[in-house]
Image (cartoon, rainbow, N blue to C red):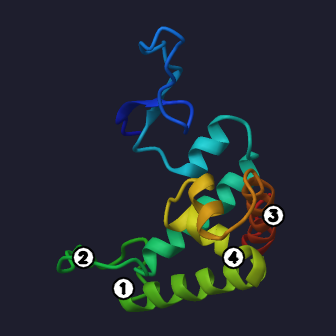
Amino acid sequence: MKRELAERELTSEGPRRGADGGRTRRRSVTVNLAESPLSWLHARGHLSDRLFDAGERLRADYERAQLSPSITMRWDPVRIKGGPDAGLSPTERQVAAKERFDGALAAAGSGLSDVLWRVVCACESLPDAERALHWPARSGKLVLKLALERVADFYRVR
């Protein structure tokens, strides 16, 4: 896994000043900017292996379906006869991934698919997703878990 470490302040209020007017020692945390929010939650025990695997399958289908905006030309590898996807053309694989992705979001439901897409596919942090959806703080994790349970059932993850 790629590591891109950065030191971040732990509070959102900014640095606090002591009574003497100087800067007091700030609390900070080291974060890996290359780590996805889903893997961050899983690594800290907030998501089970089943929910993490379901989220990873959803993200893989999102990427295979090429639903994210592209900014350069396609550099698809040359198709080799008898490869792992010998029966499907690249377009057919893309269409199949889009159908699985759409089915997984439909299984999650309209009220849960918003946070699911934001955290799993767009890699937004939970606090950012909560703010964008105008939800109370710390409510996103529960909703994300419910959505991932439904997606795990859709993908038949055990």
Q: Which amino acid type corresponds to the residue marked 3 in the rendered image?
A: Glu
Pointer 4 or 1: first along the chain:
1
Q: Which amino acid type corresponds to the residue marked 2 in the rendered image?
A: Asp
Camera-near label (3 vs 4) is: 4
Camera-near label (2 vs 4) is: 4
Residue matched to label 2: 76
- Whole-angstrom CA distance, mark 2 to mark 3, is 33 Å
Q: Which amino acid type corresponds to the residue marked 1 in the rendered image?
A: Pro
Element under label 4? helix
Give the residue displayed 73% in from the left and 46% down from the top.
47
Pointer 2 or 4: first along the chain:
2
Give the residue displayed 69% in from the left and 76% down from the top.
113
| Residue 100, percent from left and from top | 61, 82
* Tag 2 and tag 1, C-beta contact below 8 Å: yes
- Whole-angstrom CA distance, mark 2 to mark 4, is 30 Å
Residue matched to label 1: 90
The answer to whether 79 appears left or right of 14 in the picture is left
Pointer 3 or 1: first along the chain:
1
Element under label 1? helix
Q: Residues within 10 Å of mark 1 (few under 14, many from 20)?
A: some
Residue lying farthest to the top in this orientation: 20
| Residue 64, percent from left and from top | 44, 75
- Whole-angstrom CA distance, mark 3 to mark 4, is 12 Å
Mark sitting on residue 113: 4
Mark sitting on residue 149: 3
Give the residue displayed 38% in from the left and 91% down from the top.
91
